[in-house]
Image (spheres, rainbow, N blue to C red):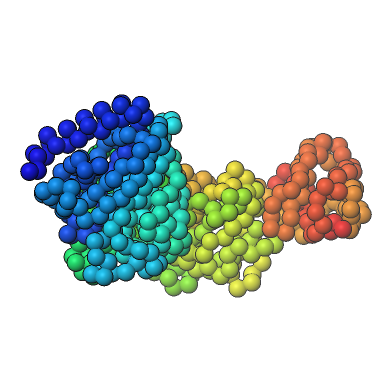
Amino acid sequence: MKKSNHKSILLSAAFMLFAAQTFGQTAELQVIHNSADPNAAKVDVYVNGSLTLNDFAFRKATPFLPLPSGVQLNIGVAPGNSSSVMDTLKNFSVTLASGNRYIAVANGVLNPSNFASNPDGKSTGFTLFLQNNIRNKSNGSDVDFIAVHGSSDAPKVDVIARTVATLVNDASYGNITGYVSVPPSKYVLDVTPAAGSPIVASFEADLSSLGGGSAVVFASGFLNPSANQNGLAFGLYAALANGTVVAFPSTSQARLQVIHNAADPAAASVDVYVNGSKLLDNFAFRKATPYIFVPAGVVLNIGVAPGSSGSVTDTLKNFAVTLQNGNSYVAVANGVLNPANFAINPDGKSTAFTLFLQNQMREAANKPGEVDFRVVHGATDAPTVDVLAGTASLVNDAQYSNITPYLSVPPASYVLNITPGNNNTTIVASFVANLSTLGGGSAVVLASGFLNPATNKNGAAFGLIGVLADGTVILFNNSTASIKEKNVSNFSIYPNPANDNVQINFASNTIKSSMLSITNTIGQEVKNEIIPAGTSNHSIKVSDLPKGIYFINSTFGKSVSKQKLIIQ
């Protein structure tokens, strides 16, 4: 007769420990039930004929149990409520190494012909995935885990910790990964068929309380239950060393950054509500949030109210948006509350208060050594413009509300010149954008404020701002008022072309110290030197610069003279 549940487990564990002590050799084994076959929802597990696990349920796990090592163990799996070892359906012979630690994952289906086949042609018959060198704690303060692909009808997959790293790459059914170590935190895990593929499922993994611990993360269940005897649906689970199994809840989330770029003085500070709850309080003009997780796949009602509003009923404007799971967005609040009281847009664009919503945003550069940024034309009274870095065009014919694709540049300091569109080379404003410390980062660069504040309620003047992924806002220095380029240069250079040194001869002795700089064709400053007062000529070394076209800029007070230099 079958013994009671708890008593048989205790007696079996005692037997195994006694046997291990008798032989003088031990190993440890954790058993995980991950067979999604409804006919194996509960099983009995026998070890060498002794009932060890009674009515062991799907998605349950044992702690690490001591077992004899160096001898053959027969592990038999029988239906739940079996009468004896004679009822076993499957038997597996294993020999464990002394001092090692193992997991045995019961997986697959009892009769594969009654279930969907594996897309990669893997056998889905009921089996044990046995893995050695298992950890019962981490090697430090991180969380150490391995991943088991145990979903029989799922193809090869990647598992990506969103915004962090790919954790599992090209894992097929039956694969068990090496250990991955991550800081104890909350993660969104995206499951995709391959790198760059659409996300098929997402899960929220809260590992924040598991520092110093270990886990076995296993993909479980069926992608298509209706084709698999209506077995339980696909999910991600973690078996801890003590036998606790944690279900990672399914989630649908997007990443969102909000930027306040509405220059209307009446919207200098706003409250932002999402689905009735206040998200941002007294959110000021030219401020931004970092990227945050928000629900995806559902309608989000974003309401904008005056600063220090009483409730969501005070909202002035409401916008309904639905975000895609796994995507990253920027929402730029822009425009004016009452366009009739402000200058019209020269291109006839609506200037009413709105949200510019853009997807496919980056929180880091695609290449570690570069800076990736998009440009948003957010100045309501500004016409179509170009943005030039030196002589290179970064933005061509952008109208109000336009958002450019991503641009990638080396981290450096740039002079950005704003010119009217349609190939007009007249510079209407210049800004110094210091991106030298942003290598590997990303930004949104926005045209902000009014070209003519006097006709726009004396709102903030036109400027360029850069918003980083962490919400930091950088106001680029406006050099228009202090630097005016002259068509006639006050110095000459010799030789030109050059390959070693260049002699700078000034038309007259410098009255006070000034700055001499060399920039390349995209506006990067590659060299600069201070010219002492009273200087009539100066030599500058150029042999360390690559061949190409450069510009020598000599700044005196409020004017700058420029000469083209060719280095051969």
Q: Nearer the viewer, residue 483 or 340?
A: 483
Q: Give above or below for 553 relative to 119.
A: above
For the point 44% across and 73% down, which residue is it?
A: 348
Give the image location of residue 308, x and y in percent. 26, 43
Give the image location of residue 387, x and y in percent. 60, 62
Give the image location of residue 151, x and y in percent. 31, 59
Q: Quadrant of the C terminus?
A: bottom right
Horizontal relation, residue 89 to residue 182: left or right: left
Q: Give above or below for 342 relative to 1.
A: below
Picture quadrant of residue 550: bottom right
Q: Can residue 504 be seen in this view?
A: no
Q: In which quarter of the image is the N terminus?
A: top left
Give the image location of residue 272, x and y in percent. 29, 50
Q: In the displayed image of the protein, which residue is found farthest to the right?
A: 495
Q: Which of 205 and 157 is in front in this view?
A: 157
For the point 40% across and 54% down, which residue is it?
A: 175
Horizontal relation, residue 383 to residue 217: left or right: right
Q: Give above or below for 540 relative to 250.
A: above
For the point 44% across and 43% down, which residue is it?
A: 179
Picture quadrant of residue 388: bottom right
For the point 38% across and 36% down, which residue is it?
A: 70
Q: Can residue 498 be seen in this view?
A: yes
